[in-house]
Amino acid sequence: MAVPILKQSHTLIASIQSALSDRDLLQLRDDLADLVGRHRARGVIVDVTALDVLDSFATRTLRGIAYTTKLRGAETVIVGIQPEVALAMVQLGLTLEGVPTALDLEEGLAFLDGRTETADDE
Amino acid sequence: MSDLHVGEAVRVRIQCSADIVTARQEGRSMAQTLGFGSTTLTIIATAISEVARNIVEYAKEGEISIAPVGNGVIRGVQIVARDHGPGIADLETAMRDGYSTSKSLGMGLPGARRLMDQFEIASARGEGTTITMTKWIG
């Protein structure tokens, strides 16, 4: 199932709607790497609120998305990790090291606003 | 403690990454019916995801069965992941954190073991792998 990706100003918002297979996740990674260039995005938000599981593969792919888009000039924030999912990730030993996270879409946008404003000032 | 009784199982055939999603949804659904709390449901679904992926990556196909288990004293859910793939030559190494011969970076099976209350793995080279894992209620 394809993940809808919206563009808002300089930010791409990937809003995951339902459970994703490994293949869907890799597709999302590839789509975002491409769209960052096409839309000249500076920020990416991946909203995982709808995901009830973040296992080792999903976590690794989210890290992959963040690192890939970073190389393309855009910062990625993962938003909406549910409390149960966070607990299971910790128990499993999974981390999103180096990848910014925020509570929800609103906080994610606020985070990116702060980042891009700073970048504009420099 | 009297012998454990394993109830009727739901079986999911595992052949591709979409089947991993189906297996964890079936597991969550059965565990919910059995009365597990929401955090434990996520933990069970995550553990199923890891063992199902192990099948897809190493054996290409196999089966996950999910069944209620218990006796008069305790009850829970038992998940059996079975494949007839190449098997694991060195179980001790495979169960070590961070070890992987594939792309999963070795979090999968050791991670699933941490998430569940009981975890047993039997494997013979050329004959396949069977993982039996259980989560108890309470």
Image: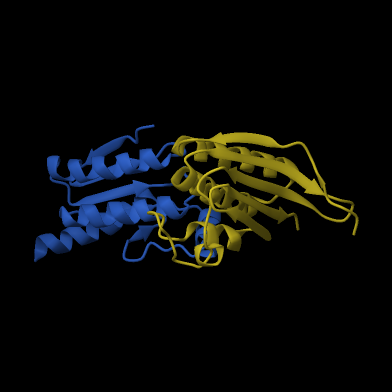
Chain colours: A blue, B yellow
Q: Quadrant of residue B137?
A: bottom right
Q: Could one spot residue A107 in this view of the protein? A: no
Q: Looking at the rendering, in which quadrant would you find the C terminus of chain B?
A: bottom right
From the viewer's perspective, is B101 left or right of B25?
A: left
Q: Position of residue B76 (x, y in %)?
A: 75, 50
Q: Looking at the rendering, in which quadrant would you find the N terminus of chain B?
A: bottom right
Can you name the residue that lies furthest to the top here?
A: A1
From the viewer's perspective, is A50 left or right of A112?
A: right
Q: Position of residue A92 (x, y in %)?
A: 52, 62
From the viewer's perspective, is A20 left or right of A75?
A: right
Number of callouts: 0
Q: Quadrant of residue B28?
A: top right
In-front residue for pair B5/A12: B5
Q: Position of residue B33 (x, y in %)?
A: 72, 40
Q: Position of residue B109 (x, y in %)?
A: 53, 58
Residue drawn at (52%, 44%) of the image = B85
In-front residue for pair B71/A38: B71
Q: Could one spot residue B74 in this view of the protein? A: yes
Can you name the residue that lies furthest to the left here?
A: A122
Residue drawn at (29%, 59%) of the image = A111
